[in-house]
Image (cartoon, coloured by chain):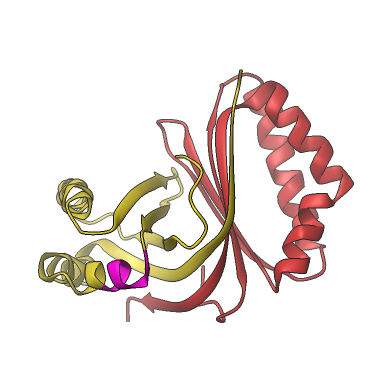
Chain colours: A red, B yellow
Amino acid sequence: MTQRPAGEIAVIFVSTVTGADSDGYAVAAAAMGALAETQPGYRGIDSARGVDGLGITVSYWADEAAAVAWRKNADHAAIRERGRGVWYESYSLHVAEIARSYDWRKA
Amino acid sequence: MTQRPAGEIAVIFVSTVTGADSDGYAVAAAAMGALAETQPGYRGIDSARGVDGLGITVSYWADEAAAVAWRKNADHAAIRERGRGVWYESYSLHVAEIARSYDWRKA
């Protein structure tokens, strides 16, 4: 969680889960986070899931090409298929270019 | 949670809370959500806070002018000041323009 440079790409993933195989989902989510960190152009991630089951993960990428390469990553694609089959009830995904950014921390 | 048109503005607010006055925070958060819905150019909101205290709220706006007007709204500004004083440990805020968007729902 930090200020981001203008021009970075934010990939906003909003999802609801079925509740099926929640242990498997937790393992896969951690593995995907670790894999994302190794990708060219990866800049960071923020993730939260509330008790109502709605989750938001925002990953940050240096540019469009980096975000698209992550989408096409084979391991990522395989886990996405499993997500559709088992873990996710629904999701939406928005790819957006950061225009400006701020941060604040209690002194 | 739905597909968004290209050109909409996503305001990504990532925060950690102090834990102080959590009841007051919940009331204020609900009031701000209700107020946002009445603003010109408001298009929607997604929000999640995990048990670790990290929260992500994404609000969607028709255009830059609508997002800026919401930032300048007097009630919103007042509650933001209270947030800095009491509820928030830290936050970051990214304003981003949506380039493309998808959604998926289990059949």
Q: Is residue A93 left or right of residue A77?
A: left
**B66 is within the stretch colored magenta:** yes
Whole-percent x, y for residue B15 in the image: 39, 61
Of B88 and B107, nearer the camera is B107
Asked if residue B105 is positioned above or below residue A49 in the image, the reply reads above
Whole-percent x, y for residue B88 in the image: 30, 64
Whole-percent x, y for residue A21 in the image: 66, 21
User: How many numbered marks have been drawn onto this rendered protein structure?
Assistant: 0
Residue drawn at (36%, 55%) of the image: B59
Looking at this rendering, what residue extends furthest in the right direction?
A74
Residue drawn at (31%, 60%) of the image: B18
**A22 is within the stretch colored magenta:** no
Q: Quadrant of the C terminus of chain B?
A: top right
Q: In which quarter of the image is residue B89?
A: bottom left
Query: Most prominent secondary structure in the magenta stretch?
Result: helix
Residue drawn at (44%, 43%) of the image: B51
Q: Give the range drawn in magenta.
A: B63-68
Asked if residue A23 is positioned above or below residue B9 in the image, the reply reads above
Asked if residue B50 is positioned above or below residue B88 in the image, the reply reads above
Q: Quadrant of residue A46?
A: bottom right
Asked if residue A16 is positioned above or below residue B67 in the image, the reply reads above
Residue drawn at (42%, 70%) of the image: B92
Q: In which quarter of the image is the N terminus of chain B?
A: top left
